Amino acid sequence: MKVIVVNDKNNKKNSKNNIGTGLEYRLNLVLEWLIYMFGYAIVLIITSNLFRSLYVENIFYGFLAAIIIYILNKTIKPVLVALTMPLIGMSLGLFYFVINVAILLLVNLILGKHFYLTGFFSPIIVSIFISIMNVLMENVIIRPLIERCKR
């Protein structure tokens, strides 16, 4: 037995309304992205205050670093993961944090003295901490905030 649900609210008779809802949808996506970037910038600032091996100058450079990390995660990280898949498999996923360290080191090269990462083993710990904090930030703060704003 199939049930077909018809929603009259989605039936727009005026094309002007369709343009408005599309623009509103895109603005909501941009706002959500900005909330995520601000949350990740806060994670970077907290991490730099807890660990000596990571330094972020201020919230502006934290926000800029979050945007750069986002861009690198969408462009370079899939290639790095594909190239190092055998290493990730042999280490049972632990090599994935080395890729995160490589992304952080690329941000270090791009931002220079405003964002830097030092040490040998401590960046791996920093990478693990950032990953855990990003998951917590997203699930505890950002998603509930976005869901509350959508109502």
Image: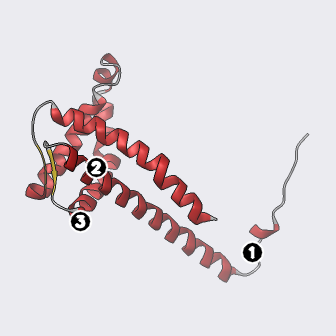
Where is residue 72 shown, x and y percent of the image? 28, 49
Where is residue 67 shown, x and y percent of the image? 30, 58
Kindly identify the residue that appears in the image at 35 percent across and 48 percent down. 74
Q: Which mark is residue 101?
A: none
Vertical placement of residue 71 versus 94, above or below: below
Mark 1 vs mark 3: give the one in front: 3
Between 34 and 5, the one lying in front of the other is 34
Locate the C terminus by quadrant. Answer: bottom right
Vertical placement of residue 96 versus 142, above or below: above
Mark before the other along the chain sequence, 1 or 3: 1
Q: Secondary structure at mark 2?
A: helix
Q: Secondary structure at mark 3?
A: helix
Q: Which mark is residue 60?
A: 3
Kindly identify the residue that appears in the image at 31 percent across and 56 percent down. 42
User: What amino acid type is highlighted by mark number 2?
Assistant: Leu
User: What amino acid type is highlighted by mark number 1?
Assistant: Lys
Where is residue 51 shown, x and y percent of the image? 18, 42
Where is residue 53 shown, x and y percent of the image? 13, 42
User: What amino acid type is highlighted by mark number 3?
Assistant: Phe
Between 75 and 142, the one lying in front of the other is 142
Give how far apart the Cα atoms at labels 2 and 3 are. 18 Å
Q: Which mark is residue 12?
A: 1
When asked about the image quadrant of residue 127, the answer is top left
Give how far apart the Cα atoms at labels 2 and 1 are. 39 Å
